[in-house]
Image (spheres, rainbow, N blue to C red):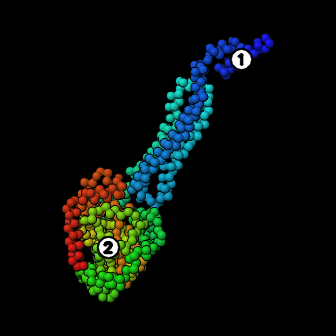
Amino acid sequence: MEDSAEDAGPVLVHRRRHLRFPHKRVDQTEDSKGLSQNDRSVLDHPWFRSFDHLCLQLRQFCLMFLTAVLPLSLSVISMICLLLFFRSVLDHPWFRSFDHLCLQLRQFCLMFLTAVLPLSLSVISMICLLLFFRSVLDHPWFRSFDHLCLQLRQFCLMFLTAVLPLSLSVISMIWYNGGGGGPATGTAEYKLPEARVASKVEQLPEDELYATENYVSLHQDADVYSQENLESLLVVDRRHNLSYEEFIAVYDGKRPVILTDVVPDWAASRWSRDFFLENYANDSAVVKTVDGNGSSISSAATRLADFAAKSSRGEPGRWMYLEDELFIPTRPELRADLGEVEVLGEDFFQLFPKEVQPWDALLLWGSPCSRSPLHIDPYNWTGINAVIAGRKKWKLFPPGQDQRFYITPDQRCGFPLDCIKYNSPVDAFSPNYTRYPEFQEAEFAEVDQVAGELLVIPTGWFHQAYNMEETIAVSRQVMNTNSYREVTEEIIKAGNVQRAELPPNFNQLSPRLQVQTLVDMLPGEILEKGRLLTQAVLGQINGLL
């Protein structure tokens, strides 16, 4: 029994020692024990080890947070910031001027720079940091110095998982917008729209450039009218189901196009001669009568019933043309019959005060052989013409040929918000080459337009319409993405706003802000003049109704 007690004693002592110092071996000698105790670091003290089981989960949680949650959060934030930044950058005029070349590239770059790149950097950093810190944090060196380098480790983790990925995102953004992608303000190779003029125009003094009556041709892109693509400009496409993106990239501000699927959806497609006689026979409209191929022109308010009695009897030397810009707008039921042309995008004319806002629906009803003058629309806007009944023939002249049209100088529109008028005395459908020999050299596109079709005429294109039979049509206008610069320039050039008073950053503003800034600068006397004129005209119309 004594032997058993003696045997049990060491075992009991060994167990107590095992509980206190689990890292020691039972067979250690006294010398080795003393050496181990002398070399033992502070971190091997039982007090520190007693907290290991409490800190392990906390360390794992911190590791997961710093290597996963934080980088992902920073990635999402950077994605949002980059998305907002690049949406403004990609709306810059430099990008818009190259829409037809890089529409898909812009979308890819936007997605890559604002989503794929930051997310990829975050995922890569998460994986690398997870693998690295899982091995490093389990190393004895880290465990023995936890109490000394806890703050340092947290700082390193924060730097590697937050500062570094964010810095890489910022560097990539700067590289794309600056050194890698070209500065947003334009380089020697890429110019902003205000410098989009042919080289011979860039040599002109600024005042001379803006004062010239040939502004329209000078303002256009030189490459648009090169011989290589002139042939394509002289072909007018007919399009069905045209998307906004393709319209902006291929047609808007560049070449005319006929849309075949817009007018049939309008309630106005039911309009006809009988429709107007049944509902508005006694109402008056402005009718122009032309005798002798333009030698005698008279305009007068005429009852629709009286006009319709003669409207089918036009001939080459004599015709009648009803042109009234207030007939539709002053009759809400007719205006409601006209649908919107969504493919044209936003109309910045809606930002104008009502006193100077152009009327948005001109009723055109012409006898056979009637025609418009050869002209560019007021303010050089984007024009649209919808044929409701009948047939038109168009001659459309690409910009850059002003010297061939014998434009009468110093013409004014006469609107309260004044503009320069670009009308030619030449009749493109019956030209007098003896009097206007240069017109023989003019290049033009010729196209027929039938009922149910809508023609979009870009800014800068001279055009003339010829009614092949009795025709009812509606003409409208829009100031959109690719015509707002031309319209604002015409308003400034007519003296409504002084160029020197524009803000220094005017050309760097978004299209909408440029238009709004210009509108806010309109003098009060112009608005008052527009208000009085509108009031007087509407009063006369109400007196006739």
Residue nearer the viewer, 5 or 471: 5
**Secondary element at tag 1:** helix
User: Can residue 287 be seen?
Assistant: no
Across and down, in percent, residue 199 comes to 36, 59
Residue occupied by mark 1? 12
Figure quadrant of the N terminus: top right
Q: Earlier in the sequence, mark 2 or mark 1?
A: 1
Residue type at tag 2: Pro
Give the answer, above or below, for where 84 lies relative to 26. below
**Secondary element at tag 2:** helix
- Give the crowd class for mark 1: few <14, some 14-19, many >=20 residues within 10 Å: few
Across and down, in percent, residue 159 comes to 50, 35
Seen at 38% across and 50% down, the residue is 185
Residue occupied by mark 2? 332
Residue nearer the viewer, 133 or 493: 133
Seen at 56% across and 35% down, the residue is 61
Residue nearer the viewer, 280 or 131: 280
Image quadrant where residue 447 sits? bottom left
Seen at 37% across and 74% down, the residue is 337
Q: Nearer the viewer, mark 2 or mark 1?
A: 1
Instruction: Give the side of residue 502 with respect to residue 169, left or right.
Output: left
User: Can residue 98 be seen?
Assistant: yes
